[in-house]
Amino acid sequence: MPTIIPRRWLVLLAVMLAFLPVVIDMTILHIAVPSLTLALDASATEVLWIIDIYPLLMAGLLVPMGTLADRIGHRRVLLIGLVIFGFASLLAAFAPTPALLIGARVLLALGGSMIMPCVLGIIRCTFEDEKERAMALGLWGTVGAAGAALGPLIGGVLLEHFWWGSAFLINVPIMLVVAPLVFILLPRATQTTPGSWALGQALLLVAGMLALVYSIKAIASATQPLAMALAVAVLGIGLLTVFVRMQLRSATPMLDLSLFSHPAILAGMIMATVAIGALAGVELTLAQELQYVLGRTPLQAGIFMIPIMAAAAVGGPIAGYLSNLCGLRLVASASLVVSSVALAFLAFADFDAPGFRVPAMLALLGLTLSIGLTASSIAIMGSVEPSKGAAAGALEATAYELGTGLGITFFGVFMSAVYSHRILLPVDLDKSLAERAARSIGDSYAVFQRLVEPQSTALIEAAKEAFSAAHELLLLTSSAMLGILGIVVFIMLSGYKGGK
């Protein structure tokens, strides 16, 4: 008989409030990229690092922090994470250079990596009943999906009246409210896993993950010599191999590798990685299309994406209800296939004259991706016992962060490659300026500010046309990826029965 905790729904409220600023921070910068790029004179490479150092570093920190939470208690680690996140937000808001902003984002990642696995671990420990847990994870999914979708709108409102740093500064008062609530509402006694927390193993995992992910970025973007990128990749694989061997020999491993024996956990991680990567990439490139190409303000761009936000807000509870009614396998795979259809439609849509169909497809995309992401949570958290809740939550959160970071990298590199190939630069443009203008539309606008007529107008018109063509091809590629993923997930979840 499952244990019923009387204050379980208040506990859920507390951890959802703690999770909200972290997930908003994943996407709030998407709408601020044009303003930030021009204000800091950041290059395309610096902008990519500003955006995705946060999810990529978190991907390496989540498992160690999830294990630490299982060892010493979710409540303690969560409160420390909230304090660090608030302080880092203050530093980021007033960063005067791209390098210092990247540094502040590193600290934000540390705080976020302590918050995310604790949230899922607390939900797993609090809700023993399988149906209640599905609904609780559905509500959590609502906060995650809606928060990610809300980020661009909040960013747009702030940038309409303040400078780009306000996108970070808003986290400070939120943390001042959330931390006391967490302190009061969360029970002091939580289930823990025996064993020590090995700092050396944690550093080994973080170093291996960062080296591997950096090499993938370097190879994809061609920012480093191929030989150097491959050497870093070999180093990362070597470090991770040593880490795995240490886990297999340890009586109390930092990462319980037996979790990967569950097909549902693997399916959930793959689904979370690809789906969140697609959502983050679509939001980022759509925000740039609206502002750079169509001349919308940050607020107008944020309002344009409200359908994604509104639909994502109801996707979590719907996923919990449908999973109990129709089965997780059908809900998970169908949501991804329908997402694929929505992206294919948006690839050929006219965003300058959206009518009814574009908002409807944006809403369908937000709804189905939200359902898919919540389904991944149900699959993962339903496959473990409560004492391993934070560890499983860390794996899922790692999938989210890797998906966000690699998704942004893939979308950015893809857009840059197609953009550079498609743009028709003015023939009399200086060679050094032409090289920068061909890298990205942000760089084209930076070059535009140094030119006079008729060169400036010719450059911007060529940039807009090239970006729109690249965006169309990108959406079609993402559509195909989600369609294939839907089929893969349907096969992988063939034996899923729920429960432990």
Image (spheres, grey):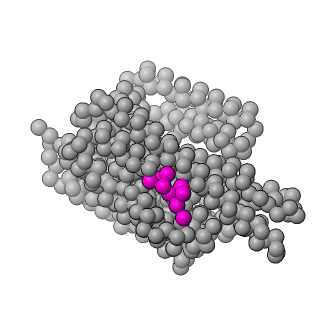
Q: Residue at x 62, y 38 (%)?
A: 216
Q: Report x, y in % for residue 26.
A: 49, 56
Q: Quadrant of the N terminus?
A: top left
Residue 138 in the image: x percent, y percent?
29, 51
**Residue at image location 58% in from the left, 54% down from the top:** 472
Looking at the image, which residue sits at the far bottom? Answer: 161
Q: The magenta stretch spans which residues?
A: 342-350
Residue 124 inside the magenta-drawn segment:
no
- The residue lying toward the viewer, choosing from 224 and 323, is 323
Q: Nearer the viewer, residue 47 or 270?
A: 270
Instruction: Place residue 394 in its image quadrant.
Output: top left
- Classify 287 as above or below 476: below
Instruction: Judge whether residue 12 can be spotted in this image.
Output: yes
Along the horizontal axis of the image, is 169 left or right of 188?
right
Q: Is residue 345 magenta?
A: yes
Seen at 53% across and 79% down, the residue is: 161
Q: Main secondary structure of the magenta part?
A: helix
Report the label total. 0
Q: Quadrant of the C terminus?
A: top left
- Residue at image location 57% in from the left, 34% down from the top: 208
251 horizontally vs 349: left or right:
left
**How far across and how far down the image is residue 262, in percent?**
34, 29
